[in-house]
Amino acid sequence: MKLRAEQDARSYSESAAAALAANTTTVVELVEDHLAHIARHDGTVSAFIHVMADEAGQQAAMLDALDPDSRGPLHGMILSVKDIIDVAGTSTTCGSHSRLDRPAECDALLVERLRKAGAVIIGKANCHEFAFGGPAFDLPFPPARNPWDSDLFPGGSSSGSGVSVAAGFCHASIGSDTAGSIRLPSSHCGIVGLKCSRDSVPLDGVTPLSPSLDSVGPMARSVADCAAIYEVMASKEATSTNADSPLCLPCPKKHGWLASSVSRMSLRHIRKPATPSGLAASNSARYRCRLSRRSTQPAPWL
């Protein structure tokens, strides 16, 4: 059974994980459903630089062949990856003309960990050139557009990551954040983004912007999904040798730890999902005007 279109707006932990555990769907079916959704709508919002349809299908078939006891914690979770992060055999373009023909020889360490945990990489997400600046129209790929209203800015520089999650093209995405590049698109697109402590997630295979500030983190539709992805990606101990580097919190052992913490304190790095009217209250006057008029109208891809 394929998940119905109206279920696409639900998080992985709320929908796909339960369906896979109950054997009412397969990873192949999930991938095919998401690829069809991308084919229908990505021409409007340009969330992807490269869709890895064949690779995702092959990985899904391998996951379906596993015994239930061999499944990883992210079994069947469909991810996009910002195109500054290496995925073996696929060019890491960084959204630039200068890097169109540079296929990565191996996966970034965080991508390797995600694959081992059962995640499926469905494509490379659009981004601002070298994860810096803003949208431009002289680049090899058109800029990503907000899935709530394609005339509006989706935030950046992890723009395609935010759009791919909000539009239902994948369950979650991996973005990078040097000066707000996870937090801004998460806010603009109404999803959850986690800006991780520096060095808590390894940056091997990630094109640097500012090495002393760069970090990589998950973007998803729920705090629980972000926590599950973080657990898989996070290094067991900080890799930095800089004595001034910030303290890296240990990876939570259970999702309940994070859920209980959210209820007791404010986590400044986590932005909860917002309705269009909620987004309107936190953005510019133009965003307030445009989104408040659409607050009762569901986006066509959700």
Image (cartoon, rainbow, N blue to C red):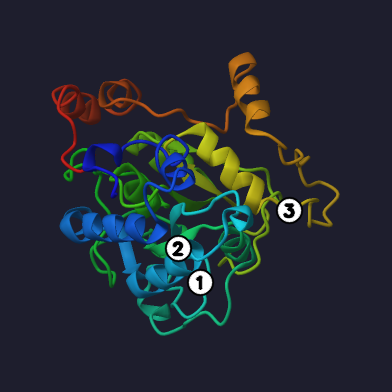
Cβ–Cβ below 8 Å for labels 1 and 2? Answer: yes
Residue drawn 42% across the image and 73% down it: 58
For the residue pair 41 and 268, the one nearer the viewer reads as 41
Disc 2 secondary structure class: strand
Crowding around mark 2 (Cα neighbors within 10 Å: few <14, some 14 to 19, many 20+) is: many
Cβ–Cβ below 8 Å for labels 3 and 1? Answer: no
Residue under label 1, please give it: 87
Residue under label 2, please give it: 121
Is residue 82 at all visible to an observer of this figure? no
Amino acid type of the residue that numbered disc 1 sits on in the rendered structure: Val
**Label 3 – label 2 distance at C-alpha:** 20 Å
Residue drawn 40% across the image and 52% down it: 161
Residue drawn 45% across the image and 28% down it: 272
Cβ–Cβ below 8 Å for labels 3 and 2? Answer: no
95 displayed left or right of 5: right
229 displayed left or right of 234: left
The picture places residue 36, in percent across and down from the top left corner, at 22, 59
**Label 3 – label 1 distance at C-alpha:** 19 Å
First in sequence, mark 3 or 2: give its number.
Answer: 2
The mark found on residue 300 in the picture is: none
In the image, residue 276 sits, relative to residue 174, either above or below, namely: above
The picture places residue 290, in percent across and down from the top left corner, at 16, 29
Question: Which residue ends up furthest to the bottom in the rendered image?
Answer: 101
First in sequence, mark 3 or 1: give its number.
Answer: 1
The picture places residue 164, in percent across and down from the top left corner, at 33, 51
First in sequence, mark 1 or 2: give its number.
Answer: 1
Disc 3 secondary structure class: loop
Residue under label 3, please give it: 235
Amino acid type of the residue that numbered disc 3 sits on in the rendered structure: Ser
Is residue 236 at all visible to an observer of this figure? yes
